[in-house]
Image: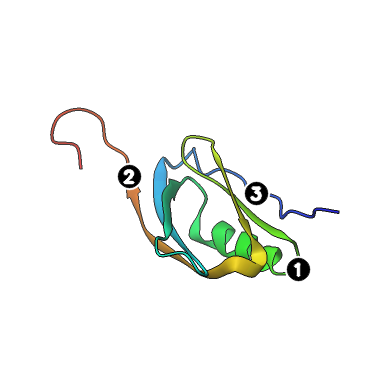
Amino acid sequence: MTTTSTPASYNHEEGIAVEVRIGVQHCAREIAFESMMTPDELAEAVKASRSAEVLELVDDKGGRILVPSVAVGYVTTGAGKKSGVGFGAQ
């Protein structure tokens, strides 16, 4: 039986993407992506995955990231940044 943590709600109304990095045990590279979830929602999803078999997160394009809970070494979140449009948008 597979149990997953439910992904938290999106943060689309604020338009702020948060950088997420997941370190996976026995893998040289970390998983890096941007998410529209708030840092608090990400923290709750990671905590909930400790009692589940899979950590499930959603990236800013709607893709799902699934990592076996026992393989998660660490999860970090960067500062949120507003997405810009056009030349010179920062």
The N terminus, quarter of image = bottom right
79 relative to 89 in the view: left or right: right
From this viewpoint, which residue is outermost toward the top? 86
Q: Secondary structure at mark 2?
A: strand
Q: Position of residue 81 (x, y in %)?
A: 32, 50
Q: What kind of residue is marked 2?
A: Lys
- Write the residue at 68% across / 63% down: 49
Identify the mark nearer the N-term, 1 or 3.
Answer: 3
Identify the mark nearer the N-term, 3 or 2.
Answer: 3
Rendered view: 72 above or below 7: below
Q: Secondary structure at mark 3?
A: loop
Q: CA distance from mark 3 to mark 2?
A: 22 Å
Q: CA distance from mark 2 to mark 1?
A: 33 Å
Of 55 and 70, nearer the camera is: 70
Rendered view: 64 above or below 4: above
From this viewpoint, which residue is outermost toward the left? 88
Q: Nearer the viewer, mark 2 or mark 1?
A: 1
Residue located beneath label 2 in the image: 82
Residue located beneath label 1 in the image: 51
- Write the residue at 25% across / 30% down: 85
Of 78 and 27, nearer the camera is: 27
Q: Residue 36, labelled with which disc?
A: none
Other-residue count near label 3 (Cα within 10 Å), few / some / many at <14 / 14–19 / ≥20: some
Q: CA distance from mark 1 to mark 3?
A: 14 Å
Q: Nearer the viewer, mark 1 or mark 3?
A: 1
Q: Secondary structure at mark 1?
A: loop
Residue located beneath label 3 in the image: 7
Rendered view: 85 above or below 30: above
Other-residue count near label 2 (Cα within 10 Å), few / some / many at <14 / 14–19 / ≥20: few
From this viewpoint, which residue is outermost toward the right? 1
Q: What kind of residue is marked 3?
A: Pro
